[in-house]
Amino acid sequence: MAIKRVLDSGWYVLGNEVKLFENEFAAFHGENLHATGVANGTDAIALCLRGLGLGPGDEVITPSHTAVATVAGIEQAGCNPVFADIDPNTRCISPDSIKENLGGNTRAIMPVHIYGQPAEMYKILEIANAHKLAVVEDCSQAHGAEIDGQKVGTFADISAYSCYPTKNLGGTGDGGVILCRSKEFSEKIKSLRQYGWNEDRESINAGFNSRLDEMQAAILRVKLSHLSNDNEKRRLIAQRYNQAFQVLPITLPSQKTNELHAMHLYVIECERRNELLEYLRSKNVGASLHYPLAGHQHAAYANRIRGGDDVPMTEIFYRKNLTLPIFPQLSDENVDHIISTVLSWFASL
Ligand SMILES: Cc1ncc(COP(=O)(O)O)c(C=O)c1O
């Protein structure tokens, strides 16, 4: 239906579906918010920073434990990423490590709600306010996650989302969104995503092309209407894992009662990770690593990003992390098989 509507309309990029998706996405997050659809989540990050007027020489503190896309987006804006460590309990950026990494060129903090786990937004905003720093939330893995009933993405003034197919809110191709409180900022982003044009197609800002297409917007509108339900299914699977694995010598995702985890990924920490990974794969369990390398461990970023030489908790985490399958379509039988396979490996030790 949605796809046919777009094909029949003959309008394929930045049209009515994008506008409706933007309105629905903003309304899903709360009142008086503005959303802007863009081409992907990396562009969303770069556009947030460019919209803030940040660029060469400006530092953005972010966790080394993230998808490299976060780092790529910061550099795409011309800014310098600075790597902070994680808090091992949340696996998100450690507020103490943010403080330790503050410097004369620090302009922004970019927390990442990694795996769908909300970062410690109250503490992060306190640090930002005290040092007059911008905060941009990277919500690419946490569509619909909440802290005290408030959706992530609405704590900072500006937030970036990826809608890549594997995300909790994913299209059938690339896509991204920027959410913000200020109408003026959202208008600036809408200009920047299309060559910095104004309504007369004069480039009043130096922008680039990061347009969202109508097909993705139409599909994302349908997916958005299922997001809360799909997230609930993910949480139910996580509950089954948590219950079954609580007896094992592994670390499970944090379970805070005042938060709704989006359960984008279910990641455990295990001492003999490589052996368990190999065993699970041999038994047809799609276990994997998110990620095989932290930001500072990639050849492209090694030894050149400030802070990357002092992230001990991240280093430890990357020796133990292992991702088990979690997605709404996973059947009860699949979950049974995954649980019994993990338990059987531990029983064999
Ligand atoms: C944490 C995080 N930030 C940013 C992105 C960038 O998104 P995209 O792949 O849409 O550019 C992703 C997705 O890969 C992500 O997981």
Image (tube, grey):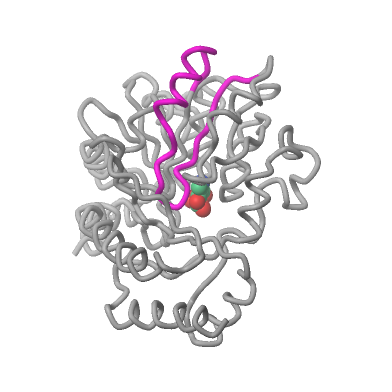
Residue 328 figure quarter: bottom left
| Residue 260 among magenta residues | no
Q: Position of residue 291 (x, y in %)?
A: 59, 58
Count of residue discs: 0
Quarter location, residue 64: top right
**The C terminus sits in image quarter:** bottom right
Per the rendered image, the range of residues in magenta is 106-134
- In this picture, is 300 found above or below 338? above
Q: Which residue is rendered at x = 41% and y = 28% of the image?
A: 158
Residue at x 45% of width, y 52% of height: 115
Give 145 or 90, whichever is nearer the viewer. 90
Q: Is residue 199 visible?
A: no
> Of 258 and 18, which appears nearest the observer?
258
Residue drawn at (52%, 18%) of the image: 133
Residue 111 among those drawn in magenta = yes
| Residue nearest the viewer, comparing 221 with 180 | 180
Residue 239 at x, y = what percent? 30, 62
Residue farthest along the right direction in this orientation = 303
Which residue is at 39% across, 24% downward?
157
> Which quadrant of the rendered structure holds the N terminus?
bottom left
- Relative image position of residue 116 (x, y in whole percent): 40, 50
Q: Position of residue 236 (x, y in %)?
A: 26, 63
